[in-house]
Image (cartoon, grey):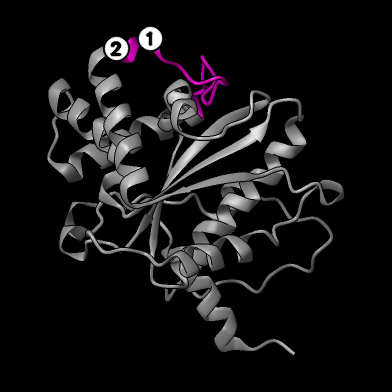
């Protein structure tokens, strides 16, 4: 039997998750991070292959890696690139429009003008300190695996973010950290056959900075789903 309270609570967690970029300097205990990853590991994967691998960083280890990436980014950013392509080089108009709107909302909330290249660069550089979060995750996958395993990894990452949220923590997935895989390999035991997929900031939200977060709209269900074979839903009361 469905528990309405549980449904509402779970929906609140899903809808309340967002990419948080403002954290306070408050440690997250090892046992909490371990519990998040353990819960997330119940994500589905084809034939139970469980293709994810995570390097969890905190304290001095995280500080060393952040310092190295920040220095590398400041010195030679153009010489580094991810080992995979995140965005299609020619995005279809629908997705390009959404991407552009994201930029307007995101930078607008931060008070960074469209032509403020320095401001945008400074905001990008905050990625390389995990936005001040006390924990940083580096996520890898075996490069010999195919697209299906990347789908599995995506479901695992969503589980990580939801497991963190329900524990009072926030997250920010960070594709841009994959650019510095060569730097990461200097510090972490990343196997040659593994590819760095992303990083993730994990920690306690700086609620005082909440007004600087742009709220991203979601397309309505009707924009992405069609229903076949269902009884017609009751007409909505428009109040007219």
Instruction: Tell me where residue 123 appears, x and y as whole percent.
Output: 22, 34
What separation in Å lies between label 1 and label 2 (alpha carbons)? 6 Å
Compare residues 178 and 219 and report the one nearer the observer.
Answer: 178
Left or right of 70, for residue 182:
right
Q: Main secondary structure of the magenta part?
A: loop
Is residue 147 covered in magenta?
Answer: no
**Mark number, residue 79:** 1
Compare residues 171 and 92 and report the one nearer the observer.
Answer: 171
Left or right of 60, for residue 176:
right
Q: Magenta stretch: give its range.
A: 76-94
The residue lying furthest to the right in this view is 47
Could you tell me which quadrant the N terminus lies in?
A: bottom right
Q: Is residue 83 above or below residue 79?
A: below
Pointer 1 and pointer 2: residues touching (CB < 8 Å)? yes
Q: Which residue is mark 2?
A: 76
**Crowding near the residue tagged with mark 2, few <14, some 14–19, many ≥20 C-alpha atoms within 10 Å:** few
Instruction: Tell me where residue 87 appears, x and y as whole percent.
Output: 51, 24
SS assignment at label 1 = helix
Give the residue displayed 25% in from the left and 37% down from the top: 126
Can residue 22 be spotted in the picture? yes
Is residue 93 covered in magenta?
Answer: yes
Can residue 127 be spotted in the picture? no
Could you tell me which quadrant the C terminus lies in?
A: bottom left
Instruction: Tell me where residue 214 appears, x and y as whole percent.
Output: 27, 49
Q: Is residue 166 above or below residue 55?
A: below
Compare residues 25 and 236 and report the one nearer the observer.
Answer: 25
């Amino acid at each position: 039997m469905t528990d309405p309270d549980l449904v509402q609570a779970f929906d609140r967690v899903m809808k309340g998750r967002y990419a948080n970029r403002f954290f306070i300097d408050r440690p997250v205990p090892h046992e909490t991070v371990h519990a998040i990853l353990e819960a997330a590991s119940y994500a589905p994967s084809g034939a139970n292959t469980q293709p994810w691998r995570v390097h969890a960083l905190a304290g001095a280890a995280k500080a060393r890696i952040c310092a190295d990436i920040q220095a590398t980014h400041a010195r030679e950013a153009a010489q580094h690139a991810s080992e995979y392509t995140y965005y299609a080089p020619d995005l279809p108009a629908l997705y390009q429009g959404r991407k552009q709107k994201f930029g307007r909302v995101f930078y607008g909330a931060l008070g960074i003008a469209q032509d403020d290249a320095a401001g945008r660069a400074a905001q990008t550089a905050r990625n390389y300190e995990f936005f001040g979060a006390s924990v940083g995750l580096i996520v890898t996958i075996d490069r010999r695996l195919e697209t299906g395993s990347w789908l599995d990894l995506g479901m695992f990452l969503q589980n990580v973010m939801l497991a963190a949220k329900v524990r009072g923590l926030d997250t920010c997935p960070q594709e841009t950290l994959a650019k510095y895989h060569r730097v990461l390999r200097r510090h972490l035991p990343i196997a040659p056959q593994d590819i760095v997929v992303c990083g993730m900031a994990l920690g306690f939200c700086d609620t005082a900075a909440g007004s600087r977060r742009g709220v991203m709209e979601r397309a309505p269900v009707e924009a992405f789903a069609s229903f076949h074979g269902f009884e017609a839903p009751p007409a909505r009361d428009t109040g007219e």
